[in-house]
Amino acid sequence: MAEWNVYFQNEDDGEAQEEGEEPGGDYRVTGRDCLVLLVDASKEMFIKEEDGETTNFDMTMQVVRSVYTRKIISSPGDLVALVFYGTKQSQDPTKSFKHVYVYHNLSELGAKRVQQVDALQGEKGALLAAETMGSDETSLCDALWCCANLFRDCKLRLGHKRLLIFTCTDQPHGGDSVKDRQARTQASDLRESGVVIELMHLMKAGGFDVSLFFRDVISPPEDESELGLQQEPCEKLADLQRRVRAKEQKKRTMAKLNLCLGEGVNVAVGMYALAVNARKPGAIRLYRESNEPVRSKSRTFHTETGSLLLPSEIKKAQVYGNKQIVMEKDEVDAIKKFDDPGLFLIGFKAMEELKLHHHIRPAVFLYPAEGEVKGSSCLFSALLTKCVERNVFALCRCISRRNYPPRFVALVPQEEKLDEGKVQTTPPGFNVIYLPYADDLRNLDPPQTPYASPTQVDKMREIVHKLRFKYRSDAFENPVLQQYYRNLEALALDMMAPDDIEDLIMPKVDQIDLRLGPLVQEFKDLVYPADYNPDTKSAAKRRAAGAGGTAEKKPKVEVSEDELRAHIQKGTLGKMTVALLKEACKQFGIRTTGTKKQELMDALVDKLAT
C-alpha cells in the first residue's frame, strides 16, 4: 500500500494546486498572486481641472474597475484588496490604524465588489466617498503597516505579492521628516518580506517630483535592464491603465534554460509567450443537488478480474515487425530523452538567410534570468548588442523541457523601444523562431492561372497604397469573446442589458470608398469585360443558353435481371449506387415509398426473390 499512497496522496488536493504551471514545465507555482491597491483619498485627489476633465480619484476608480474585471476573467484565483489612506473615517480588521480605510479585504473578487467600485465613480461616487470615508490627514506609514497585516493575516499560501500606490501628492506628509522616516522604514520592511511596491503617480498642478519622497519607498527594478520608476506622471486614463496592466501581474516563464555559448560559458534565460490565443473558459460541471463543482478521477481496472491496477502494473507496448515489444515506463522515458533541457549555440547567420516560410509556429521571447546565474544580464545584453550591430541571428539547438525533442531555432534580436512617456513598448531580447526540418517542408504544385498585365498590376498597386495603415494587434479585439464576457458581466451585475460592443474587424466601407475614389471602378474596367455581372451565371453558360443548347445529359445505365439476381446471391447489391437501384426499380415497375438505399435494396430483393 505504500506505493499506492505515494501515487494517489495528492489527488484529493487538486483544488489547492494553483494555475499557471504548464505540463512538464520548469516553473513551480508557490501560491496565489496577491495585489493590494493603495489609493490616496486626500482632498487633492478630488480636485477637478478647469477644462472639466475627470478627477484623479475618478480616473483611479476606473482603473481599479478594469483591474477587477480583468482579474475575474483571466485570474479568478488571485487575491485583491482595495485600501484608501488619507481618510477621515478609519476601518481595518485590527481597528488600530488612523486615516486608513480598508474598502475590500484581501480575497477573491466577485460581482459585488465590482458594483461597489462602480458606486465610487463620477460625481455621485465622489459624494459617496466623502460621506463614507472623508478626507483628512495622511499617514502613509500606517497605510503600509495595514497592507503588511493584510498579507500576513491571509490564511492561504501566497506567491507573488505586489502593492500599487495611486497618488498625486509627491510629499504626502507635507515635509514632516518624522513621518517620512517612519514610512520609509515600513516600506523597507515590506520589501524585505517579498512585497513589490510600485508607484502609479498622477498628474497635478506644478508637476510630480518622485525624488522628494517616493524614490526611497518603491521597489528597485527586478534586474539591471528594467526601466524602473517612471519619471513622468500619468495624465490620461489610457496611460495609467497601460502602466497598471504592465505592473499588476508577475511575468511567468514558460521555461528557464541555460544558453550555452561555449564550453563553460552559460547564460541563464527565461522563455516567455508574448501572445497566446484567448479562448472562452471551459465549462465547469456542477452537482445538480448542491451546485458544487464536480471533480473527476481516473482509475484503471483489469478487464478480466476487475481489480484496480497500480501504476507499476501498467506497461506500454509498440508493435514492430508483427511483434509486440513491451516496455517499462522508465524505458519509454529513456527513449524519449535526447539531451538535458537547454539552448546550445551553433553559430550565426545573416538576417537575409531567415525566410518567411521558415516560420512554422508562434515564436516565444528570450530574456535573461539574472536570479539564476549572476552576470547573465550583462552577457546577454552584449550578445544582443552585437547581433543588432552586425544584423545577424543566432542559430541554436533548443530543448525546452525534459523529454522534449530537439528543435533548431533562430534567435532574432529585438531592441528596446519607449514611447513618448518613457514607457517601454517593446522589450529588449531575442525572438525565438522555430525552424522547420526537411520533413516539414512540402513541394507544392500550384494551379496554373492567367497572369495579370503590367497595367492591372500598377492599378492594384495604387489601391494597396491607398489602403495601407499602421497595424497594431492590440487595436483589434475578438468580438466573440468581447460579447461573451459582456453577457457574463451583465448577468453577474444584474444589468438590464449588456453593453454594446464595436466590431473592430469589420471593414469601414465608407472610409475605404472615400480613400479609393474612382480606383475601384478603373480596376474593374481593366480586369472584367464590359458586360460582366457577378450576380448572374457564368459567361459560358449564358452563351450556351443563348445558342439554344442544353447541357448534355448522362446516358442511362440499365442493369439486366440476371445481373441483379447475381448481385443478390453474392450479397453485393449494396455496392450499386442509389441511382442504379432507382433505375432498376423503375425498370421492373417497383413502387417505393422512400429513397434510402436500404429501402430500394429491400424492394428489389422482395421482387426478384418471388
Image: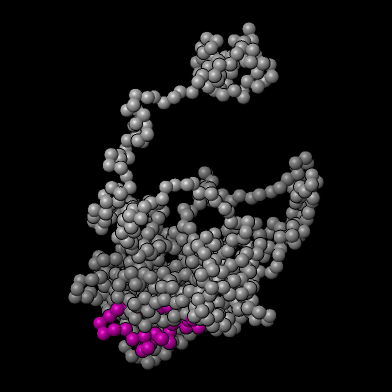
**Number of numbered tags placed on the structure image:** 0
On-image quarter of the C terminus: top right
Residue at x 76%, y 60% (from the top left corner): 330
Q: Is residue 535 above or below residue 287?
A: above
Res 167 visible: no
Q: Does residue 559 show up magenta in the picture?
A: no
Q: Is residue 359 above or below residue 181?
A: above
Res 254 visible: yes
Question: Residue 90 versus residue 349: which sits nearer the camera?
Answer: 349
Question: Residue 183 versus residue 489: which sits nearer the camera?
Answer: 489
Q: x, y (%) of residue 380?
A: 55, 80
Q: Is residue 61 above or below residue 478?
A: below
> What's the magenta region?
198-225
Q: x, y (%) of residue 163?
A: 44, 75
Q: Does residue 203 show up magenta in the picture?
A: yes
Question: Residue 171 versus residue 353: which sits nearer the camera?
Answer: 353
Q: x, y (%) of residue 186?
A: 46, 84
Which residue is the extreme one toward the bottom?
Answer: 177
Residue at x 68%, y 81% (from the top left corner): 264
Q: x, y (%) of residue 563?
A: 63, 15
- Quadrant of residue 476 in the image? bottom left
On-image quarter of the N terminus: bottom right
Would residue 138 appear left or right of 197 to someone viewing this image?
A: left
Q: What secondary structure characterizes most of the magenta part?
A: loop
Would residue 429 appear left or right of 244 to someone viewing this image?
A: right
Residue at x 59%, y 71% (from the top left corner): 395
Residue at x 45%, y 67% (from the top left corner): 80
Which residue is the extreme one toward the top?
Answer: 610
Would residue 51 appear left or right of 299 to someone viewing this image?
A: left
